[in-house]
Amino acid sequence: MVLHKLKRLFSRLGAGCINKIWRLGAGARLFGLTLISSGESFRRFRLTIREVYFTGVMSLIIILVSAFFVGMVLALQGYHTLQKYGSSEAIGVLVALALVRELGPVVTALLFAGRAGTAITAEIGLMKATEQLSAMEMMAVSPIARVIAPRFWAGVIAMPVLATLFSMVGILGGYLVAVPLIGVDAGAFWSQMQANVDWEYDILNGVFKSLVFGVACTMIALFEGYDAPPTAEGVSRATTRTVVTSSLAVLGLDFILTSFMIAV
Amino acid sequence: MANAIVEIQDLSFGYKGRLLHKGINMTFPKGKVVAIMGGSGSGKTTLLRLIGGQLKPNKGRVNVCGEIVHEQDREGIYRLRRKMGMLFQHGALFTDLSVYENVAFPMREHTSLPESMIRDLVLMKLNAVGLRGAHALMPTELSGGMARRVALARAIALDPSIIMYDEPFAGLDPISMAVICDLIRSLNDVLGATSIIVTHDVEETFQFADYVYFVADGVVAAEGTPDDLRQSELPFIHQFVHGEKDGPVPFHYAAPEYHASLLRGAR
């Protein structure tokens, strides 16, 4: 009896592992096909621009509002700690570095996965369930070139722009709390930030991170939608998986990228 | 057949260890309306997918316009598909595009016609299905019958040689059904195309089809003109054509003996 249960446990574990490896392979294959089929996304750039509007512009409100609050909280928390050491003027540097290096790219990616990623998965999954992708195939139009690739490039373009806007609005939020509310000197706030934030090491590295997160989040959302079973339950599960997988991927990738950036 | 535009020869297809088709032979002559009929799950829609090159047969061949579909590379299959139009069961209209944009879609993808000409063609196609006035509507604003007609306008957008219909009458009211029946026949004749209709609606199909194949148990169980099949004495055809509840296709799904099952549950 115990042996039988153990056997079942191992067989389930094995099946789960095989399924995960299979999905990883299928995702990598879709990624490769998307890159190969990307010509049309640039030749007919309006297709990509349209998707930039749906993924990027439509995510703008939630990202900017979140950035504003994140910046304000950072200033409050930062001031509380810095004043103990008599260096409250460094609040501008703290807010800026935290945002451009980490919070900007990471929080934007997490919000993007929840707002745009789920929308992409649900849209592609429903297109599959209602045979729209099959119809496209039967019209001799590749769904990967016409549907997947423009959305992929839209996500890759939108994410760094959104992360940059997140950092800018976050800094503005931090300024409003630190300077008019707490009374930190405005000159110290901006000059310390200007002196200590490095263009290449801090800002470009942050933009690079958001670019990588853009590739990961968009590709995960597209794959989950493309691979979803064509049923209401299948699409719902795929949408949930998009958020979970994207969030974990962003946090894992952030650690790897940060390790390399600090080492370099 | 000399003027056959689509030919299925000795075709076998199955998946997950289950053989759905076991050596099917069918011929679809140019200019004719041919129906493929059979019960649910008999593999009728799969036959359309095999003709369209979305699936590959395990054995046998599918010839379209003299070319073997599954021996083509991706480019070849796409070239053949440009000669085909397909009406999906629920229309499969692109929900993010208007009626006009849906019909214009194949033209924009496959031609470099100027916008003014695309506009004229789209309005002509929509006029043919009686929905020119609905060109600005979104698919969500259409009834089931209207969506099917728009999908038909899209399917004939590039004047295909072969038009395939997957359950064109499913879920339609009698008026919409009569409209679709009339459109299938008239568009076929006007375009000089060949129509392949997958359906299980006997009465409607027998009104306008030139030839009918019945598929059952993975083989062609019977074939002929609607008049031949109406008079058929084959038990399956008789049951199907006259809509009898019991016959060679049993009412009950295969199950253990009834009383034994009930008694086992009581124990």
Image (cartoon, coloured by chain):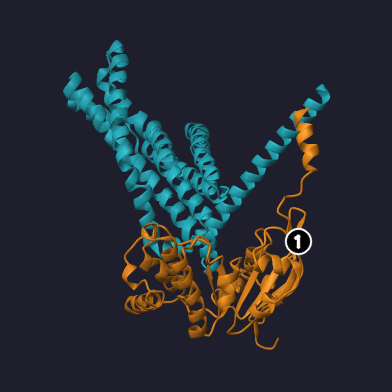
Chain colours: A cyan, B orange
Q: Is residue A191 visible?
A: no
Q: Residue at x 29, y 37 (%)?
A: A64
Q: Amino acid type of disc 1?
A: Pro
SS at mark 1 in the image? loop
Q: Is residue A238 left or right of residue A18?
A: left
Task: Find residue A158 and report its horizontal and vertical position in percent.
Answer: 38, 48
Task: Find residue B246 and report its horizontal and vertical position in percent.
Answer: 71, 58
Q: Is residue B267 left or right of residue B123?
A: right
Task: Find residue B210 and report its horizontal and vertical position in percent.
Answer: 61, 81
Looking at the image, is A166 positioned above or below residue B12? above
Query: In terms of depth relative to the viewer, which is nearer, A100 or B91?
Result: B91
Query: In terms of depth relative to the viewer, which is nearer, B36 or A169?
Result: B36
Q: Is residue A6 left or right of residue A124?
A: right
The chain letter under disc 1 is B
Query: In terms of depth relative to the viewer, which is nearer, B16 or A30?
Result: B16
Q: Is residue A111 visible?
A: yes
Q: Residue furthest top?
A: A84
Q: Identify residue for label 1.
A: B248
Query: In terms of depth relative to the viewer, which is nearer, B15 or B222?
Result: B222
Task: Find residue B124 and report its horizontal and vertical position in percent.
Answer: 37, 79
Res. A164 image quadrant: top left
Looking at the image, is B6 positioned above or below residue A150? below
Crowd tier of the residue under label 1, counting other residues whose Cα lies within 10 Å: few below 14, some 14–19, many 20 or above:
few
